[in-house]
Amino acid sequence: MTSTMNRQWRLAARPVGLPEPSVWQWTTEALPTAGAGEILVEVLYLSLDPAMRGWMNEGKSYVPPVALGAVMRALGIGRVIASGDPGFTVGDTVVGITGVQSHALLPAAEATKVDPALAPLPSFLGVLGMTGMTAYFGLLDVGQPKPGETVVVSGAAGAVGALVGQIAKLKGCRVIGIAGGADKCRYLTEQLGFDGAIDYKAEDVKKALRALAPKGVDIYFDNVGGDILDAVLSQLARHARVVICGAISQYNNTTAVKGPANYMSLLVNRARMEGFVVFDYAARYGEAVREIAGWLAAGKVTAKEDVVRGLEHFPEALLKLFKGENFGKLVLQVAG
């Protein structure tokens, strides 16, 4: 039986450093009614992503910050339980920016219908969702890999990094992953087929890179920033491409973000460093989903999900991202 109350996590204060439990407010309110052009969705799963930390900060970014007192922004997948739009019927499965809540009232134009028979629901938030789009366009459009090149990925056991490495292998590249811990490194080489892995918690990254990539790094897909970015910059090959996807090591700083000290390597090696935002590729998402789904069906790529159960556990589940505790795509199961 569907609940008549909506449970929500709202942003009560701007975090300084890690988003501690005190920045959140738990609220309940009556379910809204779907008007014309709207759908009411029971949220089944939520995507927990490093970008959420940036959305909490006041200031200019690629999307407006979450307002104080507002439901925390999040991508979710759920089931339509009421529809005021002819394009959706009760029972449809949809993806959209639902927010961190048990039910979401969405403009129909901002929801995407998906077929739950194609893949498990969390996959639409991961490998077939924003995670997959980020890896696909960041590597292929920004990195522009060529067969035989050496690709290095940081945060390589995370949802984006793991897929970047697998796509690079499909494109004929040699792939080195940087991850934290022996288990994650074994996963990269033994299960995903990476050519090498560096445990940044136990190894000297620069020294390990010299050994694994003696001719230099052609593409560096950066998810972490900080000291690891500096280490890789020192090992660039001629005409290298550095893809700036994220900087999770810097998101919870209480001081200024640590910029790259070795940026002159870009000049010496005629290299480029380029950032990207996945939303810029929205018109091409269909293309990426079709190709990734084909790779999944053929067993050419795999995806790992780390599922935490219970909406009430959102604050501590989100912290797993910043403590390196998640192994694969972090998803919060709300219902189902």
Image: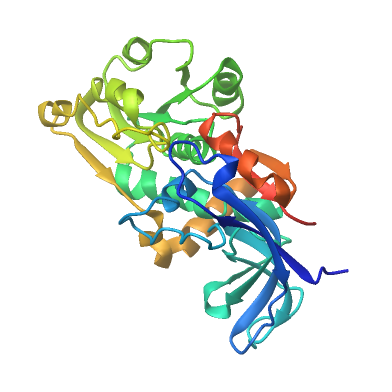
Foreground pick, 1 / 21: 21
Foreground pick, 53 / 122: 53
Residue at horizontal 29 percent and vertical 46 percent from the top = 275
Q: Measuring from the top left, give residue 69's x and y in whole percent.
A: 53, 61
Q: Which quadrant of the figure contains the C terminus? A: bottom right
235 relative to 62, above or below = above
71 relative to 149, above or below = below
Q: Measuring from the top left, give residue 226's x and y in whole percent.
A: 33, 28
Foreground pick, 313 / 226: 313
Foreground pick, 26 / 276: 26
Count of number-bearing discs: 0
Indicate how the structure is coloured in the image. Answer: rainbow
- As drawn, is 130 to the left or to the right of 224? right
* Residue, far left: 268
Q: Measuring from the top left, give residue 229's x and y in whole percent.
A: 31, 27
Asked whether residue 303 is in view, the answer is: no
Residue at horizontal 40 percent and vertical 55 percent from the top = 278
Asked whether residue 258 is in view, the answer is: yes
- As drawn, is 72 to the left or to the right of 171? right
Residue at horizontal 57 percent and vertical 15 percent from the top = 182
Residue at horizontal 28 percent and vertical 36 percent from the top = 242
196 relative to 52, above or below = above
